[in-house]
Each structure stands twice: as structure tokens, then as C-alpha cells.
Image: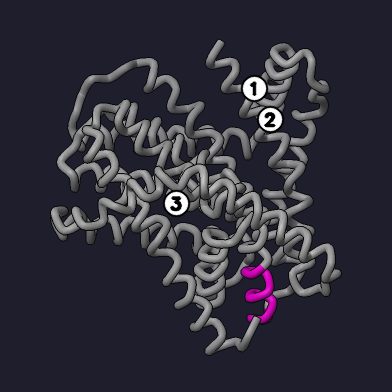
Amino acid sequence: MAVAGGRVRIGDRLERAIERRADVEGEIERGEAEQRPRSSLKRTLFWLVVTGVSLYLVAPSVLEVLRSWRRIRDLAPAWLLAMAALQAATLVCLWVLQRLALHVRGWYAVASSQLAGNALSKIAPGGGAMGAALQYRMLVRAGLSRGPVVAGLTAASLLVFAVVLALPVLAAPALARGTVDRNLVEAVVAGLAIFVVVFGVGVLLLAFDRPLRWVGRTIQRLRNRLRRGAEPLTGLPRRLVRERDRILGTLGAAWKRALAASIGRWAFDYLTLLAALAAVGSHPRPALVLLAFCTAQILAQIPVTPGGLGFVEAGLTATLTLAGVAAGDAVLATFAYRLFSYWLMLPLGLVGMALHRHRFGRA
């Protein structure tokens, strides 16, 4: 029943993701339009209250992780450099994906605007849409047309989000197998094998209608069967095909490279977590490390705190402990991972903003 329930939640997430696409597109397109001061103020106050309450509730988890900063000196510099390099690789994958989606050759505008938008999404209430709106304005300021920017950014974000949703489902067989090997090589191989499978499944779903419709029907049927009291979910297969076609229409012939870049973004992020665990001298069960990683990425999508702040720290520390990592090492590994995947992105955003303004002016 737990597996079925997980599929139901995935169905709900797919439904919300598709419905939210129009909201995200609208938020991007309104990036340069005038907003009514009263409604804008109410929305801002609402998100500030929600974020403030949420941060208060998760503050103990955040503080516990941040208190381990002194122990960062105990980690080998080589592992810290490795984590920095792996996070740089995740950024490059995102830039490649957005360049393909936007059909531009240059890197400067894409890289600088992505860094700035990503940083804003990690600190602003409801940051995902605000970060997308900022990147939209910066790209338009750089000379790109409004329509293709909206379509490209939306297609890229949906492709990245789809990979996040697929990871827990495709990692389930590895979790059921219950491997007991406890070494870094096994964890790397197990994780990368899952990402190869994700690529294969992604190619299948993007290239053919029948598998995608089957997935939609299966999720829809399970969701409606297990949530009889809720409003029935209808038309999911048709909507999935329609959204897939819109993504393919935006990406064109480069869709395979875009899919590979989307998967590479998460694969390098996963390797960053493995490097953090290796840095603290811990080698837990590979399948459970993958579970911890998937949990962290899903928690990061929670919009009530910027970048999932607090929720990711609490969830990742807990799942790493369940995976066999000592409590103190789990906290330190979480801090090291978030140091590079979250906190480092904030000053990089300022750098991206400054570089973009230097060349293109204020967005």
C-alpha cells in the first residue's frame, strides 16, 4: 500500500506541476508589467508570514546543522574541492539545458541570469516563480525575445522537475533489493545506474505516445481508486502528452541533449552528497543514500521556505541517520552538502547579477 500511496502522491504532484505551469508562465510574463500596489503588498505579506512561521518551526534543524561549521576544518581539502567542482558541473548542465531550450549560442547571458535567478529563488518567499521572473527580465534585457524566453525557461524547468519526480520511483527496486555493500564505489555505481535508467525511460516517454499514456492512465487509476472521496482526476494521459509535445516543440532536435543535461544536473548533485559523506568518513548503504538524496530534492520543492531551508536539513539528516550514518557525521555531511548546493549559490548570484548589469545594464 505504501508503494501505491507513493504513486498517488506522484500523480498529485504531476497534476499540480501541470496546473502550475500556467501560473509560472504568467509570473514570468508579468515580470516587467506594473503590479497593483495593494495586491502586490498583500501577496508579499502573505508569503513573509508563511515563510516566517515555517522558518520558526524548522529553526532547530537549521541551527543544529549550522553549528557544525567549525568541524568543516576537519574535512580533507581535496573533498571540499571535489564538492565545489561537482556543484560547478551542476551549474554547467543547467546552462547547457537553458541554452538548448532558448536556442542561443552564447553562454554569458544564460549563465549570469541563471545564477542571479537561482540565488533569488533560494532567499525569497515563494522563490521559484520570483527567480524565474528575474531571469526572464535579465534575458529580455540581454536582447532575447519575450515569447521564446517564456517557453524555453518553462520547458527547462519542467524537464528538471520531471527527473526529480522520476528518481524515487526508479530507485524503488534498488531500495527493495536491500544491498548491504558499504563503500563509495558501490554507491557511485548504484546511483549512476539509476540515472542511466532515468535517461532511457525519459527517451522512451519523450519519443513515444503509448508509454506516456500508459503512465498517465496508471497513475490516474491508482490515484482515483485510493482517494475515492476526492474529486476524480481525469484527462491526465492527454495532458501529459500535450505538455510533452510543448516541451519537444520548444527543444526541437536537441531534446536528447536537453534530457541528458537535466539528468546530469541531478547526477552531479548526487555525487556532491556522496563526496560529503566520504569527507566525513562514512560509507552507508548505497540504496539508502539514494533515498536520502531523493528525499532532500523533494523537500527542496516545498515553497513555504526559500529553497526548502530547514526542511531539507531536517529530512536529509534524518534519512542519512537511517542509512547508517552516525548522528554527528550526518549533521556535518548535511552541512557540507548544503554549503555548496545552497549557501555558495547566494554569493554566486550576486556575481551573476553584477556581471549581467556590467554588460547589459539593469534588468
Asked if the magenta segment contains residue 274, the reply would be: no
- Where's the N terminus, which quadrant? top right
Considering only order in the chain, which callout, 3 or 1, is on the residue closer to the N terminus? Answer: 1
Is the residue marked by circle 2 packed among few (<14), some (14-19), or many (20+) residues within 10 Å? some
Percent from the top left, x then y, of residue 322?
32, 26
- Where's the C terminus, which quadrant? bottom right
**In the figure, is residue 220 to the left or right of 274?**
right
Q: Which residue is mark 1?
A: 8
Q: Amino acid at mark 2?
A: Asp
Residue shown at the point (60%, 52%) measured from the top left: 51
Q: Amino acid at mark 3?
A: Arg
| Foreground pick, 330 / 189 | 330
Can you tell which mark lies on residue 265?
3
Q: Is residue 318 above or below residue 344?
A: above
Q: How many marks?
A: 3
Q: Which residues are magenta?
A: 134-143
The image quadrant of residue 173 is top left
Residue shown at the point (33%, 53%) measured from the top left: 66
Say which element carries label 3: helix
Can you tell which mark lies on residue 12?
2
